[in-house]
Image (spheres, rainbow, N blue to C red):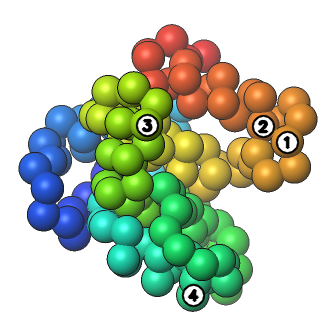
Amino acid sequence: MTVLLDNRQTRPLDEEALSARVLRVMGALKLDEEAELSLVICGDDEIAQLNRQYLDRPGPTNVLAFAQGEGTGAGLNPGLLGDVVVSIDTSLREAAENDLDPDEHLVRLVIHGLLHLLGHDHVAGGQEAERMEELTEELLWGSAP
């Protein structure tokens, strides 16, 4: 398994620790050894641009996920999971507003994006949204199935 981390922001970030944590999550999900995740950590300006360009939504968001298994070329390389983009600015703001550990919240958002790449969805609400939230927390704290 591989995590390709592209840190596009200037705040301090322990890239090795983040990558190692994400690899442990991928292992807990029992992903194929060939699984590859592209992870981008950026600021609000960049994620707002992506949010507008790809989802036609204004402003920044905390995380975006772009699944490689969808659209043109889907299935060409099943090991390529896709891209998860996290705004460090929004992540830190949410952590402060909700009295969360900033590092843990960043990992939580990465897990959330990874689960989207694997087909989980919370948009419609209901049981799938609840299960996605539960699985996110289980993976964050190392008690995943």
Location of residue 10 by image quarter = bottom left
Amino acid of disc 2: Ala
Viewer-nearest residue: 73 or 16: 16
- Of badges 3 and 2, nearer the viewer stands 3
Amino acid of disc 1: Gly
Mark positioned earlier in the residue sequence (3 or 2)? 3
Instruction: Give the class, few, some or many, for how many residues have Cα within 10 Å of label 4's Cα (few <14, many ≥20).
Output: few
Q: Give the spatial CA distance, label 3 vs label 2.
A: 22 Å
Q: What residue is pinned by disc 4? A: 53
Mark positioned earlier in the residue sequence (1 or 3)? 3
Mark positioned earlier in the residue sequence (1 or 4)? 4
Amino acid of disc 3: Glu
Residue 129 drawn at (x, y percent): 78, 37
| Secondary-structure class at tag 2 | helix
Instruction: Mark 2 and mark 1 in contact? Answer it, CB < 8 Å.
Output: yes
Instruction: Mark 3 and mark 2 in contact? Answer it, CB < 8 Å.
Output: no
Q: Please indicate, yes or no, whether residue 107 appears anywhere in the rendered image.
A: no
Q: Please indicate, yes or no, whether residue 123 appears anywhere in the rendered image.
A: yes
| Secondary-structure class at tag 3 | helix
Instruction: Mark 1 and mark 4 in contact? Answer it, CB < 8 Å.
Output: no
Residue 125, numbered label: 1
Residue 94, numbered label: none
Amino acid of disc 4: Gln
Q: What residue is pinned by disc 2? A: 129
Position of the C terminus, as image quadrant, is top right
Left or right position of 39 against 113: left
Residue 97, numbered label: 3
